[in-house]
Amino acid sequence: MSLTRVPGLLFGGDYNPEQWPEEVWAEDVRLMAEAGVTMATVAVFAWSRLEPEPGAHDFAWLDRVLDLLHEHGVAADLATATATPPPWLVRDHPEVMPVDAQGVRLEFGSRQGYCPSSPVFREHAVRLAAAMATRYGGHPALAMWHVGNEYADHTLECFCPESARHFRAWLRARYGTVAALNTAWGTSCWGQHYTGFEQVEPPRKAPGPVNPGQLLDWRRFCSDALLELFAAERDTLREITPDIPVTTNFMSLLHGLDYWTWAAAEDLVSDDAYPDPADPGSHVAVALSYDLMRSLKRRPWLLLESAPSAVSWREVNAPKPPGMMRLHSLQAVAHGADGVMFFQWRQARYGPEKFHSAMLPHGGVHTRGWRDTLRLGADLRRLGEVAGTATRAEVALVFGWDSWWGLEAPESMPSNRLRLKELLLAWYAPLHARGIAVDLAPPDRDLSDYRVVIVPNLYLCTAEQAKALAAVTGELVVGPFSGVVDESDQVHDGGAPGPLRDLLGVAVDEFWPLPDGATQRVRHAGGGTGRARTWTEWLRPDDDVAVLARYEGGDLDGLPAVTRRGTATYVSCLLDDVTPVLDRVLGGVPAIGPPPGVEAVRRGRHLFLLNHTTAPQQVTLPYQGRDLLTDTDLRGVVRLAPRDAVVLRIEGDT
Ligand SMILES: [Zn+2]
């Protein structure tokens, strides 16, 4: 099933015609057709042009844009245009602007200037969404609704009185009584006992560390409050245009929003991904976020924004060298994307994003950028048959947002150096290097499909989640500092690993974080040595537990570092190299084993080989088949030019 009614892989970008005189539009759509663009994201920031005065709509220009797009074979990912309120709304209702933790109300003049909990903003946003749906529901260009934009990019939280009221209502619904809230938040500590919900406030700037239970609920609330705002628009759209899929563009592995919950609330998952071209490891980190997007609904997704070359918001914005834009785009398809789109179509001449690259650069059709656009469009047309196909992964990496929020609370942890992304990548990178497909999964999902389940960290682990992990039928690997607290951020009885105690057969006597730069030697039972950094633990294993590695030297000399009970492995530290653990647990999981820097990804009956290095590479094909990019039959050893790719349609029995 395709994501929208547009066949093949979607190709296109954000189109902001309101930034250009109308005579430019004809050239835009002519060049879009030339490049093979099939979809344009329109009107994301157009509220002030669509509703220049309260309730007075000006749709005529957007009518002409959508007509032009349709005449040139381009479908519209039409925004509800609510990503930024117009000046009149802020002037008439200053309270729609968000307030920071210090109590400062932010000003108009950027974007995403709204309080997530503002009923005034919500009412106006829903009204505009309804007007858009009514106006364009029957337009032949309309293929998809794009609600808001990059929720939580600038505005994740607001500390205004309205947000405080909303937070209290959320807490009432969660706890029922203030007594239950007192218990959950542990308000007996530091004299915070509440006698009524009206005394409870958001965690504004306080003299010292804020109550961690309050902070965790605030993180949950902020994700939920924005989701409510999204859902209000979505419900309106579904009512008026029930057949048009609704999405909002995610921001890869974003700390602020629980995308497991968010994805369930939309019809298709779309993502904005901006790997840094200056970071040689960026293709690995971005592959992880692509796999997350595919895993959110366990179906294909859409890369809705990426950069053709440089972005405009880093300290130094490196361009993408020749070949990288194409390679990263094909990489998204390899990891389950059914389309590749960019920010943006035509490079802006003004505004904060005027130096952000575009499909059609300032220099026009004689530029390298435009040639790259044409080439990618042609490549994606050749890959049309990949659209809709599924990925089969036998390895799952498990994480949850609750646990992430708890782990990375700003104060009061044993170490602030344990970061979830780093913990995930420590396992993901070597799996990726071996060409092993990986799904991401939340801790409460049925994991019985997987041969290997790796939980890099589950600081917050409930009894139910522990049960789900105990039900894993394959190999289970649990990383350090897991099973520490319950859903209220309170330490489990008996300490870590709490509800995982019997499953793993170890108790943690004491956390032993390492200073920055320090390492701890680890000796594996097989004989080799490795190093741990950032984190170690003083473990007390049960008698029947096998010790797979011990700390060597230092304060923990001789104590177990990696243990195993049955098929459950516990790794009590952040290992520099997890190869010995992977070698033991991966067993018969198929691995393609490409050369270093070459990514090998199976998607359905297609094999993607992506050379991320700047040197030619040779790969011995595990299958024979036809390369869709060059339309040639391949078998045996193939040569990949620097930053080149092969997309093999595998022939015969696989
Ligand atoms: Zn607010």
Image (spheres, helix red, strand yellow):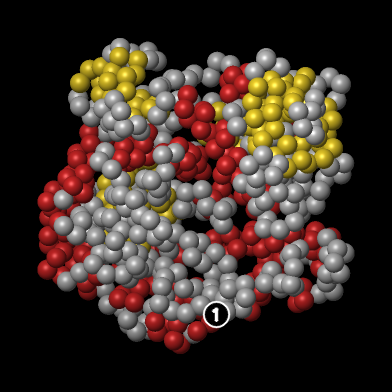
Which quarter of the figure is the N terminus placed in? top left
Comparing 601 with 197, the one in front is 601
Residue in the picture at 70% in, 26% down: 522
* Residue 345 in view of the camera: yes
Q: Is residue 69 above or below residue 160?
A: above
Which quarter of the figure is the C terminus placed in? top left
Residue in the picture at 48% in, 65% down: 154
Where residue 473 sits: x, y (%)?
Answer: 67, 24
Q: Is residue 352 above or below residue 594?
A: below
Q: Is residue 645 left or right of residue 402?
A: left
Residue in the picture at 74% in, 59% down: 212
Circle 1 SS class:
loop
The residue wearing badge 1 is 105
Residue in the picture at 43% in, 79% down: 108
Q: Is residue 367 left or right of residue 509?
A: left
Q: Is residue 155 left or right of residue 312?
A: right
Residue type highlighted by circle 1: Arg
